[in-house]
Image: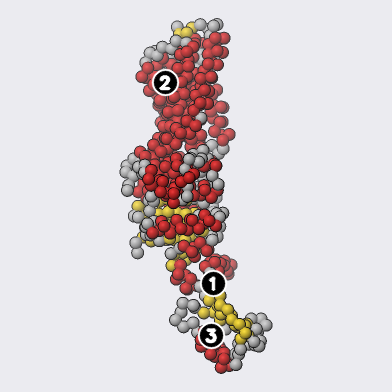
């Protein structure tokens, strides 16, 4: 029997395996974003928001929702995807994946697909939680969902790369904690970059996360600090860069094959 | 000869500079049990790992049933099942899920009846809902075999299947391998337990320092190299082997009390009756006699040490 041109059963096996792993920790997995979001609303929304009523005509509580969703989407995507591929490398069970009739594309589709699914679910749970605190209007709901999926896929690819690159569990945390979280906080997740004084405003424009958050914010409010086209292009460029790195990993067997 | 696996000029040099395989050629016949024998670090696992896609070769080609393992990896890999040496398992997965996962990964449609049969054959059925980390080492190894069989492979690789395994499991494993062979599955096992090769293999390959020293039918190997030795304990010590017994190439031990005669047990004429007649005619009496047959282990040790001697000389 031949597998054919596309091993869809293999992709499904990996996808289900990963989703099953998430289900084992379902309650903590969902309780964390709910509690975190609530905390953000208590601190930023009530304490600070009462002094900062509106940004660009949007209530501050609503303004931070897209940023909150992006922050969690980044960390969830990177964590789930990097852990998903790092674990079999760590335990040695990767032997089976390497010996299976799976192409690089199918392998990535299984792992990244599952990680992106979970990250998207978490982001939507945050949206639902936020809706309990503030009234969230979404100008372009379908574009919002599409953008959410694109960013989830991109950061899951990035996480996959980290999972292959990392030599241990500590290294899995390095990039998210030292790079992604600071860039997100400084990238206008909780404020408009127009509120910054020069030269900080210009410097901030070199932070790629600014474009990701603003693109997403545009799908909610129809306004953003930077042009939406730039935001989409930046997201897409990062997506392609990650794909290229992964293609190189599989072609050379970097940290996968001796 | 119907070859199911064909290895040509396969070599591997690791980044560290270690030469794990010098160019190796090997043909595996369909349906046979082939034992790859060699000391630790000889290149057994490297060879298997290349064939199964875990290690990139430095040179050479491997085809499985005519499918190149690089160009046509899907068709090639679908036919192979691998049981690695180490126990690599997903700690929190139940036995049933982890075995079904393997089947899906190899592109096979679900077949609960088949998975059940595999689990029953391996005495795992009662454990099907147990998660991996709660199983004993022996049970984990059984699961590893079940995973390798889950997609109904035509070729099964067993890398040191009985290393650190108790007697019962070893016996079960040997039975399973024989059953699989009856179903037409080709089995390639690596081992450094000679008795395993002697017990099960149709053919034996000896590998040492990345070089395949010999590949031979096990029986032929035993015949060719499996010498038998007759020891005669003499009633009276001798100073030297008497000239009338020169035809038999006898050796005398240090104090002259034992005569040793090495012969081919499978040969048409062992030379024993004529030797005994000649001894009687010469008036040499013996108190006792015994014979000893060399095992595959002795053959193996002598092969490997001959090589070492040869290298030391050159």
Q: Position of residue B77 (x, y in %)?
A: 39, 49
- Report crowding for label 3: few under 14, some 14 to 19, many 20 or more residues within 10 A (C-alpha): some
Kindly report the distance in space between the C-alpha atoms of the residues bearing marks 3 and 1: 19 Å
Q: Position of residue B91 (x, y in %)?
A: 52, 40
- Report crowding for label 1: few under 14, some 14 to 19, many 20 or more residues within 10 A (C-alpha): few
| Residue at x 51% of width, y 30% of height | A25
* Residue A96 placement, left or right of B279: left
Q: Secondary structure at mark 1?
A: loop
**The one of B123 and B264 positioned closer to us in this rendering:** B123
Task: Say which residue label 2 marks.
Answer: A231
Parent chain of label 1:
B
Q: Secondary structure at mark 2?
A: helix
Q: Position of residue B4 (x, y in %)?
A: 37, 58
Instruction: Give the number of callouts.
Output: 3
Q: Position of residue B197 (x, y in %)?
A: 49, 63
Task: Say which residue label 3 marks.
Answer: B248
Quarter of the image for residue A247 reads top left
Can I make out residue B101 in this image? Answer: yes
Of callouts 3 and 1, which one flags the residue occurring earlier in the amino acid sequence?
3
Q: Secondary structure at mark 3?
A: helix
Parent chain of label 2:
A
Kindly report the distance in space between the C-alpha atoms of the residues bearing marks 2 and 1: 77 Å
Kindly report the distance in space between the C-alpha atoms of the residues bearing marks 3 and 2: 93 Å
Q: Nearer the viewer, mark 3 or mark 2?
A: 3
Task: Say which residue label 1 marks.
Answer: B294
Q: Is residue B291 above or below residue A133?
A: below
**The one of B304 and A191 positioned closer to us in this rendering:** B304
Q: Which mark is residue A220?
A: none
Can I make out residue A105 in this image? Answer: no
Same subunit, labels 3 and 2: the answer reads no
């Amino acid at each position: 029997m031949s597998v054919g041109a596309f091993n869809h059963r293999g992709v499904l096996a990996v996808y289900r395996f990963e989703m099953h792993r998430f289900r084992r920790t379902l309650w903590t997995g969902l309780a964390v974003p709910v509690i975190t979001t609530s905390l953000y609303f208590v601190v930023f929304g009530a304490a600070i928001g009462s002094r900062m009523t509106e940004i660009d005509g949007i209530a501050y509580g609503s303004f931070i929702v897209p940023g909150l969703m992006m922050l969690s989407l980044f960390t969830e995507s990177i964590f789930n995807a990097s852990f998903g591929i790092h674990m079999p490398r760590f335990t040695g069970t990767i032997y089976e994946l390497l010996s299976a009739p799976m192409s690089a594309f199918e392998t990535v589709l299984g792992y990244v697909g599952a990680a992106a699914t979970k990250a998207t679910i978490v982001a939507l749970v945050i949206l639902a939680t936020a809706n309990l605190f503030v009234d969230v209007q979404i100008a372009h709901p379908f574009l919002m969902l599409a953008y959410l999926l694109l960013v989830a896929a991109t950061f899951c690819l990035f996480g996959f790369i980290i999972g292959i690159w990392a030599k241990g569990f500590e290294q899995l945390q390095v990039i998210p904690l030292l790079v992604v979280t600071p860039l997100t906080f400084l990238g206008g997740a909780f404020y408009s970059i127009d509120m910054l004084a020069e030269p900080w405003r210009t410097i901030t424009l070199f932070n790629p996360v600014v474009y990701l958050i603003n693109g997403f914010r545009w799908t909610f409010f129809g306004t953003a600090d930077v042009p939406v086209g730039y935001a989409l292009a930046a997201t897409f460029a990062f997506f392609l860069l990650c794909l290229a790195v992964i293609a190189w990993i599989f072609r050379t067997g970097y940290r996968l094959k001796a | 000869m119907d070859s199911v696996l064909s290895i040509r000029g396969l070599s591997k040099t690791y980044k560290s500079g270690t030469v794990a395989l010098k160019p190796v050629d090997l043909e595996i016949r369909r349906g046979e049990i082939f034992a790859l024998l060699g000391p630790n670090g000889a290149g057994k696992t490297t060879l298997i790992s290349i064939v199964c896609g875990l290690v990139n070769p430095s040179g050479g080609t491997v085809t499985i049933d005519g499918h190149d393992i690089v160009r046509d990896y899907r068709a090639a890999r679908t036919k192979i099942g691998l049981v690695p040496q180490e126990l690599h398992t997903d700690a929190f997965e139940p036995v049933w899920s982890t075995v079904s996962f393997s089947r899906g990964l190899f592109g096979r449609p679900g077949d609960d009846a088949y998975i059940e049969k595999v689990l029953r054959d391996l005495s795992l059925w009662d454990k099907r809902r147990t998660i991996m980390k709660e199983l004993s080492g022996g049970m984990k190894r059984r699961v590893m075999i079940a995973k390798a069989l889950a997609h109904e492979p035509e070729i099964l690789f067993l890398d040191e299947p009985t290393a650190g395994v108790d007697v019962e499991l070893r016996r079960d494993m040997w039975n399973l391998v024989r059953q699989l062979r009856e179903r037409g599955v080709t089995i390639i096992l690596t081992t450094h337990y000679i008795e395993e090769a002697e017990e099960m293999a149709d053919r034996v390959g000896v590998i040492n320092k990345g070089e395949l020293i010999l590949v031979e039918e096990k029986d032929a190997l035993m015949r060719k190299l499996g010498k038998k030795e007759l020891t005669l304990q003499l009633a009276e010590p001798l100073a030297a082997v008497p000239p009338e017994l020169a035809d038999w190439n006898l050796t005398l031990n240090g104090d002259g009390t034992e005569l040793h005669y090495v012969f081919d047990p499978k040969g048409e004429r062992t030379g024993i009756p004529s030797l005994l007649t000649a001894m009687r005619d010469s008036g040499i009496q013996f108190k006792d006699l015994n014979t000893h047959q060399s095992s595959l282990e002795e053959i193996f040790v002598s092969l490997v040490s001959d090589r070492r001697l040869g290298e030391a000389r050159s």
